[in-house]
Amino acid sequence: MPDDIRRPRVLDVLAADEPWEVPDAWLAGIRRQLKAWADDPQVLRPLRAGAFPDFAKGTPAAVWFTHQIAPLLTGWIPVLHGEYADISGEITRDFYRPTVRLGGAGHLIRVAPADWPLQMIAGARGFREPGRRQALQLSRDAVRLFIDAPPMTARATALTAAFDRVLADREATDLHVTGEYDAIAKYWRAEALHEDERAALPELSGATSALRYTLRMMRDTHARLLMVVPDEYAGDFADLLAGLILATGLRGIPQNVAQILGSATEDVQKALGNLRTGFDPHVWLANNTAWLAHAVRHDHRAVARAWAAAATRVSVHLAGVLGDAPWPEPEVPDLGALFRLLDRERWQVVDAHVEPEKKPEPLAAPVRKPAVRAAAAEPEAGTEPLAEVAQLAEVRAIPRDTSIPAPETYDDPLAELDALIGLESIKDSVRRMVAEIKTNLRRQELGLPSHERARHMVFVGKPGTAKTTIARLLGRIYKQLGVLEKGHVIEVDRSDLVGSSVGTTAPITAAKFREALGGVLFVDEAYTLVPDNSPGDFGLEAVTTILKMMEDHRDDCIVIVAGYHREMQRFMESNTGLASRFPKLLSFSEYDNKQLVAIFELQARQKGMLYTDAVLDVVRGVIPPAPRAHNFGNGRFIRNVLEEAISNQATRLSERDPDTLTERDLRELLPEDVKPPTSMRAEDYLFQKPGT
């Protein structure tokens, strides 16, 4: 395979049918135009230094404006994902100097004032007529740059056409060059756009028009999704809107929404009454996530994406984010779970043709909370020409949670399974087990003979490869399917099962087994129950007791035995009854470097830490090269690396005056903080030493 083959780098606009692989030549063309503006001393620039925060000194207004409009040309309240999620930063990288980098490891939601295309015109109103005329022309030219970018084509084409008409009409041009801004904004709301352009740019007609568009798109996409993927929990549009209202934290229908709904308000009120008592937003979100996942798996990705994009717009409107209210918590819908599923399916297709080592490194999304406000304070009207242009659109950056174990934010264990990094063969095995169970349950409903096999399993793999995590998920999945009554997991090892004298092992083991009834008994390092060359070891009695109780409680408990590959092979051969009672074997692969770095990223974000690409480079350097030692800790090793880094950061900061430490100081990891772990928890030491 050629060395230059790599995974494509994409801008994934959720409202679009599919991600766009961004051509290098397209990016280069945009950057050349920005540089041409920067090199032209006649191009409009702000009158005071610092007017454009996070931009290099002397950056032209047209460059800043291009940075602002790029994401907004993809849609109203767009959701952006992929390696080029921060498309603005990529385009303006020669001028943009952010203090925190928002990259492709997560997704961004952009909101801005409804008059966002007029930002440069508004900022230039303190200039003389030639400067204001240039602001109008440059606004048009900046928008025109994006006409050949598929996710932006429709809106960029409509907006360019409107600007062209303004420039061709002397009266309209005079308004923009000499008129008050309020009159200019009114012109754009009422006269500037043709009907088809208004459909592409609904927010330019005002807040009510934008909300009406948002609700209509939600209604239409909900109906489309119900048609292709019927779901008993989804309900009709009234049920959906009621759920969105409650999940956003509201108690009733906002007045502006009621005015648009008209007579349909009564249906939504009724749905609110039915849902309000005992409403759990997390359960509601989990049901929607499962519905979207089902649609994606059955090749209805486009409508699932459109539904999620529409629901996001509705939740932003309902929460009042456009009026500077807080973002809804929890996030509505769960975009992180959806993008993890979409990414996994996208990479499965690409990886059939791309070597794993050629995959690009994700950019860090160094944020602690799921919302980061990046808006500058709005200057007073009429002061500092072009300074007021520097009001940044608000950005929400949500990191992609992909690590082992996944954070407990899912009510659907299958969605949580999908979110785990790597483990593709394990995920496929679990899905086959679920399919087998569902098929057998249906056979039973129809009075047909079922073809059930024992559900007990053998897990083999090195420490820290998510064996325990998968066991816990299986317990929840089997409970959800009605196979297990409780779905809990009892985790044991040799010390929990083997007594210290003759006659004590069987009662101890039986007691532990009874604790697991209705759930899963997970026996870690099961091979230690049958040590080499110890025919009289008490562990053999524990194995015999487990086998007997498995037979006595065949449908009441699932037993999973786990350990290293070689040792578990010896364990299975130690008793002739083991192989027949454990028909399923799941092999857990070791994580590669990219997956280990992804684990570090997630765990750092969960602890509220900030990091840069330089930190991740050091993390890569402390990971032992493959092939690794038999007892390498995988996920546990990375946890120790992070904890050691946080400890080193504390030592570094202790040399400073505590009163001078800012929140950023306390959250930021530096490259020198990351070192190979010199200590580990006691339980980690035991995990590193097989047979103890």
Image (cartoon, helix red, strand yellow):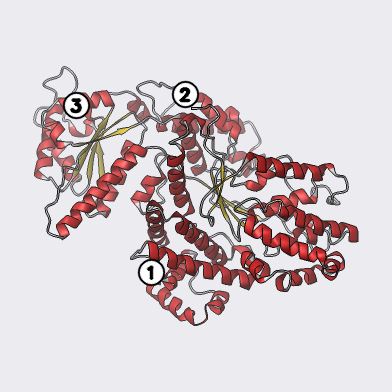
Q: Residue at x 10, y 28 (%)?
A: 576
In percent of width and height, residue 308 lies at: 48, 59
Q: Amino acid at mark 3?
A: Phe
Q: CA distance from mark 2 to mark 1?
A: 55 Å
In which quadrant of the rendered view does residue 153 lie?
Answer: bottom right
Q: Secondary structure at mark 3?
A: helix
Specify whether 124 is left or right of 310: right
Q: Residues within 10 Å of mark 2 (few under 14, many from 20)?
A: few
In depth, the one of 432 and 646 nearer the eye is: 432
For label 1, the SS is loop
- Point out residue 344 in the picture as x, y percentages from the top left corner: 43, 43
Give the quadrant of the C terminus: top left
Residue identified by numbered label 3: 571
Classify residue 318 by image quadrant: bottom right
Q: Residue at x 83, y 41 (%)?
A: 39
Q: CA distance from mark 3 to mark 2?
A: 33 Å
Count every numbered label the image shows and give the total.
3
Q: Circle 1 sits on which residue?
A: 235
Left or right placement of residue 174 versus residue 241 in this view? right
- Name the residue that disc number 2 marks: 678
Earlier residue among tags 3 and 1: 1
Q: Quick check: 630 above or below 109?
A: above
Q: CA distance from mark 3 to mark 1?
A: 51 Å
